[in-house]
Amino acid sequence: MESHKIQFTEKELSHWAGMGEYVLLPPDGSYEIALKYEGEPPHGDSFHTAIVDGRQLPGYAWGCIFSMSACSSFVAFSWMERKFERLTTIVDVRRSLYFALPMYIYHPCIEWPAVLLGPASGPEHYAFVGSEVWRAF
C-alpha cells in the first residue's frame, strides 16, 4: 500500500488521515510520522501503528484528525492503548514521550501548554501544569 504524504504548515496544523497509510510531515520538516494501516474496529474509523521519528508508539492511532503545534514539537490525535478504547494523546516528539489526556477531544488544537477543543476553541480544554506523568516510547 502506498503512503500518502501530508505536509502540516503553520497555517494548516490539523489534517484528517485514515483508511490508508500516511506519512505526516511537521511544519519544520524535522521528522516524520508514519501511519501503517492495521484494520478497522467494528464501528468507526481505521486504526494504525504510529512510527514517530523512527520509534513505534505503543497502542494504535485512530484514523481521524491529527494536529501539530506550530513549533512542530507536539502532535495530538485519537489513540487507543488497547482495542477499542478511544482516548486523546499528545506526543512530545523531541523527547519521545506521550501523555493520554483525561478527556477525549475529537479535534484537538495545540496552543501549548493547552490542548483545546477544535479550531474554534470553546471552554473545554486541557492545560498542562507540569505535574503530568509522561510515558517514554
Image (cartoon, rainbow, N blue to C red):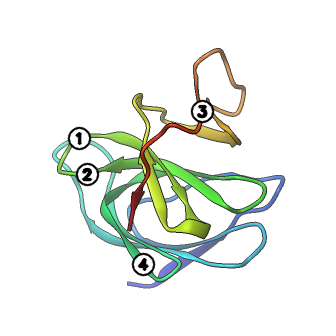
Residue type highlighted by circle 1: Glu
Query: Is residue 52 placed above or below 133 in the rendered structure?
Result: below
Where is residue 120, by image quadrant? top right
Q: Position of residue 103 (x, y in %)?
A: 41, 28
What number of labels is visible? Answer: 4
Q: Position of residue 131 (x, y in %)?
A: 51, 37
Q: Is label 1 or label 2 in front?
A: 2
Which residue bears the numbered disc 3? 129
Q: Are marks 3 and 1 in contact (CB under 8 Å)?
A: no
Mark-to-mark CA distance, 1 and 4? 22 Å
Left or right of 26? Residue 104 is: left
Of all residues, the one furthest to the front in this rendering is: 131
Residue type highlighted by circle 3: Val
Left or right of 128? Residue 36 is: left
Of all residues, the one furthest to the top in this rendering is: 123
Q: Position of residue 16 (x, y in %)?
A: 55, 53
Mark-to-mark CA distance, 2 and 3? 23 Å
For mark 2, give the secondary structure: loop
Image quarter (top left, top right, bottom left or bottom right) of the N terminus: bottom left
* Disc marking residue 81: 2
Q: Residue at x 53, y 78 (%)?
A: 53
